[in-house]
Image (cartoon, rainbow, N blue to C red):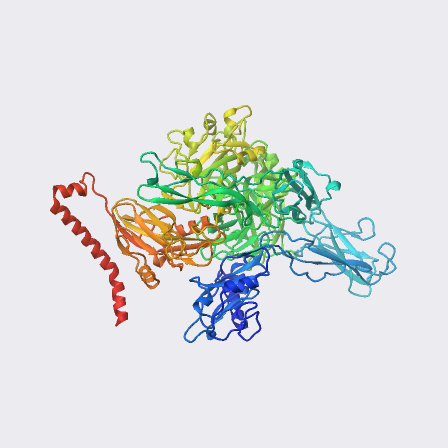
Amino acid sequence: MASAPPLLCLLVAAAHLAGARATTTPEEPTATAWGLEGPSLSPGQPSPALEDWEARAVPAEASEWTSWFNVDHPGGDGDFESLAAIRFYYGPARVCPRPLALEARTTDWALPSTVGERVHLNPTRGFWCLNREQPRGRRCSNYHVRFRCPLEATWGAWGPWGPCSGSCGPGRRLRRRRCPSPTGDACPGRPLEAQKCVRPTCPGCSSKTCKCPNHVLLGSVVTPSGRPLPGARVSLRDWSGTVAITDAHGTFRMPGVCANSRANVSAQMDGFSAGLGQAQANGSISAVVTVVLNKLEKPYLVKHPESRVREAGQNVTFCCKASGTPVPKKYSWFHNGTLLDRREHRYGAHLELRGLRPDQAGTYHCKAWNDAGTVRSGTAWLTVLGPGQPACNPQPQEHLIKLPDDCGQPGSGPTYLNVGLCPDTLCPSPAGSSPRCGDAGSRCCSVRRLESREIHCSNYVLPVKVVAECGCQKCLPPRGLVRGRVVATDSGEPLRFAQILLGQEPIGFTSYQGDFTIEVPPSTQRLVVTFLDPSGEFMDTVTVLPFDPRGGGVYHDVKAMRKKAPVILDAGESNRIPLGEMQDEAPLGELVLPPGAFRRADGEPYTGAVEARVTFVDPRDLSSAAAAPSDLRFVDSDGELAPLRTYGMFSVDLRAAGSAEQLQAGPVAVRVDAGQIRMAGHVEALRLWSLNPDTGLWEEESGFQPERSAAARARREERVFLVGNVEIRERRLFNLDVPERRRCFVKVRAYANDKFTPNEQVEGVVVTLVNLEPAPGFSANPRAWGRFDSAVTGPNGACLPAFCDEARPDAYTALVTASLGGEELEPAPSRPRPRAATVGVAQPYLERLAYRRTDHDDPALKRNGFRINLAKPRPGEPAEAKGPVYPWRSLRECQEAPVTASHFRFARVEADKYEYNVVPFREGAPASWTGDVLAWWPNPQEFRACFLKVQIQGPQEYMVRSHNAGGSHPRTQGQLYGLRDARSVRDPERPGTTAACVEFKCSGMLFDQRQVDRTLVTIMPQGSCRRVAINGLLRDYLARHPPAAPADDPAAFSMLAPLDPLGHNYGVYTVTDQSPRLAKEIAIGRCFDGSSDGFSREMKAEAGTAVTFQCREPPAGRPSLFQRLLESPATALGDIRREMGQVARAQAQSTGPLRTRRGRAQQ
């Protein structure tokens, strides 16, 4: 079963490529053989320069290039990069519906004209190169292509007209069109168009005045899945009151309704939206009708208003869009919390404000309504600039970067340089009056001008470019990216080929290793993702993944919970299934399924054997928090997201024994042991909830009532049970929860090392807070968790929601952890007692919070988290007014708190590394990218990270430096791109051997995208080291791809970096991603593992290495070489000759196999 999805994908992909090869013959009509306007070419004639074609073919409109694509490799007939295959492999969202132009280059970044090959290009179909058209003896190179897409959002074609409304007489029909915008902007105009239409003339009677005594109307009321609905109220149009009520089978009978009347029948039922159906004659005196009722669903926001910046006098449009059943039609808009007059502003889902005034600045949000409830949108900020007020201050803000250690004064500590920073703020659009949801051209405050500086270090000059001026310029819309891996909670095995759903929409599958990549849709505030296991062994994993809305990438480890082993039930008897199987703990409750409770999907009773799998997520097991579904939120009566405190979740899977047929059941009683719920007021507030997998929100199913049983009283049973009822139908995941109003926010920051320097904060760290039960002795459930939340750190840290209490500090406690790409971060220490300056929290508040790192009581435990009391700040206490715990209504104060305010701290463990870029770039903020030929990352839409694995034979750990300079490009040759330092890591299984994963700048196109540069990379361990071995495959590759690097020092390794992504066999690890941070984290994980598809945080020093050094440290008390030469010249020179001989022999052994192979080739 697990192999079916990938096999299907491969077959479909093969069909795409086969179709491309079959349809791209040179004789068929195309735009031209090489472009849109160029002449037809003869076989063997090279194609003209693509730049010439581009200049003639690209319309003069706002557009941008996509990233590069390569789906085919030359072989057989040639190289085929069809647009259909690219859309299949990379997803339809990666290329716009109507590309304007196409560019193709070889994988060595050469133009077809440069290599003398004839190719075919068509922006609407793709690229192809045929071997039979090339000069004699030549075959097509391996090409990759990119497309130029318009920035302006444009409508797709109109769809067909729908049916005419009504059964007779005048009506209307509708047609729709889609707006496939690659930037997420809305298209101008309406998506819907109406047209009048006419049905046949209505007969001269209605259901009210015309009856046929001998005729009958037979009908049924069902759900979309076909389940009958008993007790539905049925009425006829133009007829007052209820005419019939459906029976136990969901059917009804109406005598006297004419068979050919085409009567409109409506049905209503509590908990469902009203439905309408039209009677159809099935005989001379009878008619039938089926009315489908959808279950009421609260509205859910799928588009939130976005913050805008405008100048006074301009216009602005805010947009909301909500889904639900029925679809919400009523919207309300609020400015600074005050309801706006609907008649004055004439708003609906869109709010348009014209001729803006300064007093209209502030916050805006909307509310959407339907029959099931209301929902509130996120808050958007409107900034109105007065005349002459700049949106972007040209003076850059301070941004300090750390210089290399040898660039400062000896003994003075690290040296920092202010390179400047342009704030990530929005600018008004040039027109500022577009009546559309998205701005036509996004503009933001970014770098306008750089200046070159030189820093004089100990024995070299370090170049640097600093920000000299900021200004409003066009910027790319942020694209949030989430990558991760889904593994089993119990065994760690990957969830292979699981289907991924984004809401209701399938977007792909996990890989063989359980990996996944999701691009966050624009205007998303909650990313709800579902992973469906094809084998059926795991629960449906519904999770809400935090992401960076500014466009940075985030990595998540998702845990999937294995279903419990099935038990066989008799459908004709009463069955009880316990909830909770904790050792030495009583079950929390049980499910009671009465006789005859099971039904098939169509409502027919089921009487055979039932295979039941009930999986309980028990909060008393602290490890289960990682696998708990969703994020325990619901929409309250005010339409706002509110948290829940759980007492357990359970998944119910009922199937007919021996088959995969899914069964339904109801009513099912849920009995909960009231003695297990000890928090004051929670027994009365406990509710039963079900999870909406599309929204990731919990919706109330029923309340609980104390069980009243005469038999129980007769037995004088000590335990008291609460009983609730539920129907097990479409939804299979349930929750025993209590809404909690005592809420706070906790401020957390992450740092590059344990010095906690303010300008070395780390973004993109996933911080998780698990609410725990109080300390022993407080009247609540011991050793249990109540809820959990995660957030991603930005430039100002993260604020995590949590339950808290003001009167009793230990009423709620929390466990807080942090991770970055699989790496666990360490919080500030607390032994022997926490220090305010280290933890980051001022006294006496720190004492009240009772901060304890996880190793506080036992140093042998892991140091990956801390526990605190969630003591709500008390009014009138100045020490508690500035964090780290903030009241629920002070979210903005928490988010904007300065670094000097109290906060909790995490630091990276793998902190022994250093990065320096000549052109500064903050990897957590892609908007900070600046176009420059010396930029480390030349393409802001696609980031390629390259690492080299260096093995070191020596008694300790060593720092390894990577020096990266221009190697072959005439504009950058000899100029520095940047430096990278990494400390080698010990291999736990090989004493005396360490290895370092050192980043180097990948070769390839520079910012100008016209010529490649082979980066000159020099690897130098910082110590008394000599190079003793080079990977044979890597050395052979470098020899076959000139030019060679200049003669290098035996204490270093130099190369002109390869253009190809080689892999672990060469000791080179390359990962391309839309996020630089994710690309580096994945590449480092592969480098540690020594494989091209694995991931590890434990160094395997001898797997997949590129170069080996041997380092020696003089023994303690041994005189230096200078002293030894003075005291005993002959002995010292003998030692030197012996050491050099050992190195020479090691090098000969490593080159021997290569020389043998070359000799055989010459023979």
**Front-most of residues 108 and 379:** 108
Total marks in image: 0
Instruction: State left or right for residue 601 relative to residue 1129.
Output: right
Asked if residue 1076 shows in the view, the reply is yes
User: Picture coordinates of residue 412 (x, y %)?
Assistant: 34, 34
Instruction: State left or right for residue 35 relative to residue 418.
Output: right
User: Picture coordinates of residue 304 (x, y %)?
Assistant: 62, 45
**Front-most of residues 470 and 710:** 470
Give the position of the C terminus as an image quadrant.
Answer: bottom left
**Vertical arrangement, residue 200 with respect to residue 729, above or below:** below
**Vertical arrangement, residue 528 with respect to residue 712, above or below:** below
**Front-most of residues 779 and 507:** 507
Asked if residue 620 shows in the view, the reply is no
Instruction: State left or right for residue 175 relative to residue 836.
Output: right
Give me the residue at 52% from left, 30% from top.
811
Instruction: State left or right for residue 635 relative to residue 393.
Output: right
User: Picture coordinates of residue 296 (x, y %)?
Assistant: 68, 48
User: Picture coordinates of residue 122 (x, y %)?
Assistant: 55, 66
State the image quarter where residue 610 is shown: bottom right
Give me the residue at 22% from left, 59% from top.
1148
